[in-house]
Image: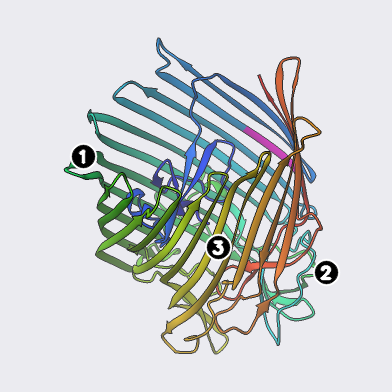
Amino acid sequence: MLGSELALNGMYGLAPDGHVPTEFLERVEVLKGPGALLNGMAPFGAVGGSINLVTKHASDAPITSVSTDYTSSSQFGTHIDVGRRGGDHNQFGVRYNGVYRSGGTALDEQWKVRGLNALALDFREERVRLSIDAYHSQEIFKNGSAFFASFTGIGAAAAPSASKNLFIGTNARFENAAVMARGELDIAENVTVFAGIGFLDSRNFGFTNGTQAPSVNLLGNFTGPRIVNLRGYTNTLSTQGGIRGQLDTGPLRHQFVLSASALKLSQSSEFGFSGSYRSNIYLPVVPPQAPPPAVVPNTAFNPSRPYFETDPRKTGENYLASLAFADTISAFDDRIQFIGGLRSQRVMTKTFQANTGLETNSYDSHRLSPAYALIVKPFDNRLSLYANYIEGLSQGLRVTNPLATNFNESFPPFVSKQIETGAKLDLGILANTLSFYEITQPTLSTVTSGGLISYKPVRQRNQGIEWNVFGEPIPGVRVLGGVTYMVGVITHSADGKTTGKNAFGIPRWQANFYGEWDLPYLVGVTVEGRVIYTSALYVDSLNYYRIPEWARFDAGARYTTKIYGTDMTLRANVNNLFNHSYWSGAFNDGFATLDAPRTVLLSATFNF
C-alpha cells in the first residue's frame, strides 16, 4: 500500500512510502464505512474505510525501553524508546524512538539497512492540546529485491523458492522525512476546534521497479529488459481544520463534525532500461545493469551533487480538497443511532512528460458525495444491527508500468460506492461481527494489441460476506480471526473482452486466525500461532492465469520476567514456519507476487 493511502494522526500524505516503520506507532486504527467520511477519505479510492497510524507520545509514566533483535539470516538491530513528561502538572511531553538494523535477510545474498529517528512533542492543558511529530526513515537494499512475475503460454509456472534472488546487483535507497503540527482548543464545554499542517519529502534512488520477471513460461524461462527506477520523489503538503462537538435537541443527542482538508502532491520517477536478457526463475542469472539516462538539467539540478542526489523533472501533480459535514444522531440511550453526512470533493490532476517537462494531460473534477448509516440495538448493548451507504470521488488511476505504451497516463477521477449491512454480537468474553457488502469502483486492465501493452480503466464490483471474531473465551486464551467470501467481477470494459470476467487478485475465500495462550504451568510464558489461508485466484483480467490456493503457518512464544528489578521480555517468532513457497497474490493486472521465505525473529526488550 502506498504511504499516501495511510493517514498519520488523521492526516493523509504524511506516512512514509515503502515499508512503514512500526516502532514509532502507538496503534493502527482501521475505520470502516461512514467512519471514512468522519475522518477523511484516502486519496486513491479506499471508499469503504481508512487506515490511520497513531504515533507514540509521552505517557504519564516515564518510559525507557531498549530492544535488541535478530532476523534471519544475519540481521541485527536495536530500538530505543524514551518518553518523559515535565512541568508542574505534566503538561509538557517528549517521546523519542530510534532504530538501526543491518545485515543479511532471508533472501539469498541480500543485505538490508534500516534506520529511524522519530521525535514527538506535546503540550496539554485543560482546554488546549498541541503536538509536533517529526521523523526521518531510511532503507537501503543491497544486492537484490523480492520480485513479481507475469506469465505466458498455457498456464502459470510453479512458484520458485521464496528465498531465490533474481536480481543480484540491484541496489536501492528510500528516504522519508516529515514533520506535522496539530492543535485542539475547547471553545466551549462540548465544542472543540482543531487544525493541522504537515510536510513530507520522500525520495528513492536506484530502486528496481518491482523487479519484474516478464512472460515466464511453464519451465520458468523469461526474456526481457531490466527496468530500474533510477530516482524519484514525492513531496506533499497536507492541511486540515474543523470543529466538532456535541449538543442535545430534546430527546436527540448530536455529535457533529465540520471539517476541511487539502492535500497537494508533487511526484516524479525516472526510469532506465537494460538490454533484453534471458533468465530463469528457478536458476537465475545475474542481470545486466541498466545504464543511467542522460541528466536533464532543471531548476533543482546541482552539478556538484552525485547523479542520484539530483532531482528529476516533475511527472505528476495532484491537488485534493474537501469540505465535509457529518452528524451522529442518537436516541433512546444510544439504542438507535443515525449517521448522515455530505462531503464536497475536488480533485485536480496534472501529468508531465519526464524528459521535457511539458504537460500531457490534466483533470479538474468536483462532486458532492453522501454517506448514511443506521445502527439499532434492539435488546441491549450486546447486539447491534447496522446498515450503511457511502460514496466518494477519488483521484484517477495512473499507469505505473514503464513497459506500457501509455506509461504515466492519468485517467479522470472516479466515483466509488459501497453498501454494507451486518450485525455485531458482543458477549463480553467473545465478540462476533457478520457483514454483507458490495463495492463498485474502477481498476486498470491490460490491453495487448500487436505485441504492445497498454492499460485501460474497467469497472469492477466486489460482493462479499465477512465474519470476524475476537476476545478471550477462556482466561489466558485470546483469539482473533475471520473468514471472507467474496466475488469480484468486471462489470464493464471498453472493448468488452473482460466484461463478466473474474476480477484479478480477488480470491473467493480468505481466512485468518490468530491465537495466544498464557501457559498456566510456566508463569510469564505465552505461546502464539497464526494460520493464513487464501483460495485460488486469477492474476490477469482475461482469466488466463490462475494461481493455486495456499496456507501459511506462523508460530511464536514470549517470556516476561524481571531481572534485578528490570522488566524483561524475550520473544521468538517464526513466519512461514514450514518454508512453503507460493504465489501469494496479484500486483497489477497480470503479475503474481511471491511470498516471503521462512523468517526467524528473536528479540529481547528491557524496560528500565
State the residue at coordinates (46%, 67%).
436
Residue furthest toward the top? 88
Residue furthest toward the front? 379
Label 2 environment density (alpha carbons within 10 Å; few <14, some 14–19, many ≥20): few
**Local SS, label 3:** strand
Residue 61 vs 153, above or below: the answer is above
Q: Position of residue 142 (x, y in %)?
A: 71, 50
Say which amino acid is labelled 3.
Phe
- The residue labelled by disc 1 is 247
Q: Is 17 or 394 nearer to us in this picture? A: 394
Q: Nearer the viewer, mark 1 or mark 2?
A: 1
State the residue at coordinates (41%, 54%).
384
Q: CA distance from mark 1 to mark 2?
A: 68 Å
Res 283 label: 2
Residue 572 in view? no
Say which amino acid is labelled 1.
Leu
Q: CA distance from mark 3 to mark 2?
A: 27 Å
Q: Earlier in the sequence, mark 3 or mark 2?
A: 3
Indicate yes or no whether the magenta region holds residue 146. Answer: no
The image quarter in which residue 271 lies? bottom right
Q: CA distance from mark 3 to mark 1?
A: 56 Å
Res 271 label: 3
Q: Earlier in the sequence, mark 3 or mark 1?
A: 1
139 horizontally vs 253: left or right: right
447 horizontally vs 104: left or right: left
> Magenta segment, which residues?
99-103
Q: Position of residue 482 (x, y in %)?
A: 59, 59
Q: Is 250 or 302 nearer to us in this picture? A: 250
Q: Is 36 or 66 nearer to us in this picture? A: 36
